Image (cartoon, grey):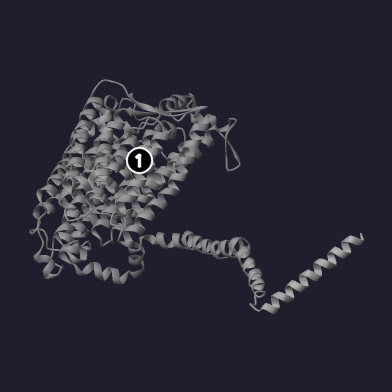
Amino acid sequence: MYHAIVFLPLLGFLIAGLFGNAIGAKAAEYVTSGLLVVAALLSWVAFFTVGFGEGEAFTVPVLRFIETAGLSVSWAFRIDTLTVVMLVVVNSVSALVHIYSIGYMHHDPHRPRFFAYLSLFTFAMLMLVTSDNLVQMFFGWEGVGLASYLLIGFWYKKPSANAAAMKAFIVNRVGDFGFALGIFGVFVLFGSIEFGTIFASTQAFIPAEGAEAAAHGPAVLNFLGYELDRHAAITVVCLLLFMGAMGKSAQVPLHTWLPDAMEGPTPVSALIHAATMVTAGVFMVARLSPIFELSHTALLVVTVIGAFTAFFAATVGLVQNDIKRVIAYSTCSQLGYMFVAIGLGFYSAAIFHLFTHAFFKALLFLGSGSVIHAVSDEQDMRRMGGLRKLIPWTYWMMVIGTLALTGVGIPVTIIGTAGFFSKDAIIEGAFAAHSAAAPFAFVLLVVAAMFTSFYSWRLIFMTFHGKPRATADVMHHVHESPMVMLVPLFVLAFGALFAGIVFHDFFIGHGYDEFWKGALFILPENHILHEFHDVPLWVKLAPLAAMLAGFAVAFQFYIRSPETPKRLAAQHRGLYAFLLNKWYFDELYDVLFVRPAKRLGHFLWKTGDGRVIDGLGPDGISARVGDVTARVVKLQSGFLYHYAFAMLIGVAALVTWMMLGSNF
């Protein structure tokens, strides 16, 4: 079964990629979508079998991968609760995106290539989440990076799409460099890259008196010329691994690629940048939780970065006008919530939010695609409005997604959307945690929740309510999406409404131990799993109050007084420009990295390559040969008496040489 789950998407990629033009676009669509549906159904079977069964984690061998002196790597699937949760997320969302794309990409002439790329991405992601060792994880990690590059730049004739694909690829290489160094560090410290061996070895790093006891031991790692003891080495390795997670999961300062990636087709945004690839970093840190638990410093950094990213992305989302970019910054912000939970040791809450977020964020992205499809590919919300009655199914699906994203629910009850259970648990965990960064994280997450509510309802009001701001021709052609696009929205809406109610007790409640079965590791002294249930009532009400405040302000600004936002933007031009330009991160990187790199490249091109290498090398030699031959050519005058004179000079020289030679 597990072989089928992983390799069916690969089979779809090969069929659509190699024979797509031969079998036709329709066949490529149906084959790849059908194989993903089968894989998704099998993933749910695995989820209930492993998560709710009584068996322990196990390994499914595939083949021998690398065999060298001192390193043996097998290709195998590590099957535990964390794996099957990710299988459900990846394959369910991918299957629905495949089906949705049949309608959304209906007029695209390159559909076989698009569906092949989707299936390739899914296979690479499955390789990542089923990995039994760090080498296999890195293989899947780079595979999703490649597939992301291909999908973002799918419309390669658009310069903006090519630029966005290159930006995503390059920024992720920065994070992946750190990830690779982290893998090397793990191998040095533990002598293995297989998870089972590593996790068993980590127990030696946690003596009874705590991990801090190892802080003054002998040096075990040399990094950048520094001899590091066991505690410092673990911290450095964890930070390098987290650097990879920052790139893949778009955390500040490696977040800049995510909004630009919206240049790809909308189904790509839903598959890669909402539910799957961007969660790879969260999954990786959760999988390596036994290692991260050894370094309180690394977890502190993860918490701070996550909290700041949640706040930063939420502030930028307040003023964005592109419907997909608003949701993209929302994704960035929600990933910050997940990393806060990771940093606090609340791994199950992070994965729970990853799980629920997949449903409502994919719903919002595909819903925005339905809107774009209806208004002739327009993405600027300032040119929408009045669509509620024209595309009612899309409207209600977007409302459900917004309710889940903003965490609508009744505290101290089991009534609420998926986001209510998972996001509120992280906020309550931030209050209950004993980390030094917990108060900072709690405040920023509550503020981010208020901002999230504001920009989410702003999107709904600007897009569907008020007077139409599109041209009469566009409004005349507005139409509801076909059922092949709406059915995936219905399925995702069901998950956005009920996934929290059904699964919260297993992920973070009383059924925790029976469900996770040790797939996530947490130090015994960290009691966050129990203490977050007992926070004061005002803490439980804080996310609700923040959500209502954001909704009230959005309603006032975009329903009752639509002129107010324009007036405030005019009064606070500096702040508005600061947020609209995304805190000027791109401009800062342009000054610090892009321009110096261009100047260095120009210098090496013109001076190093042109003047030095070519000037003294091939070009210089050829120039000298040309000079010599130009002078020699002048001897070829074409006059007979010149040649006779030269011959006579030669004969005289020869006779002289012979005469002088005979005298010796």
The residue drawn where x is 36% and y is 64% is: 578
Is residue 504 shown left or right of residue 71? left
- Classify 639 as above or below 173: below
Where residue 279 sits, quadrant-wise, is: top left
Question: Residue 23 versus residue 643: which sits nearer the camera?
Answer: 643
Quadrant in which the N terminus is drawn: top left
Is residue 616 shown left or right of residue 349? right
Residue 209 in view in this figure: no
Where residue 219 sits, quadrant-wise, is: top right
Residue at image mark 1 = 282
Question: Residue 6 versus residue 205: which sits nearer the camera?
Answer: 6
Residue 308 coordinates in the image, percent (x, y): 38, 50
**Residue type at tag 1:** Val
The residue drawn where x is 28% and y is 33% is: 6
- Classify 365 as above or below 232: below
- Classify 210 as above or below 479: above
Residue 363 in view in this figure: yes
Residue 248 coordinates in the image, percent (x, y): 37, 46
Question: Residue 255 versus residue 638: which sits nearer the camera?
Answer: 638
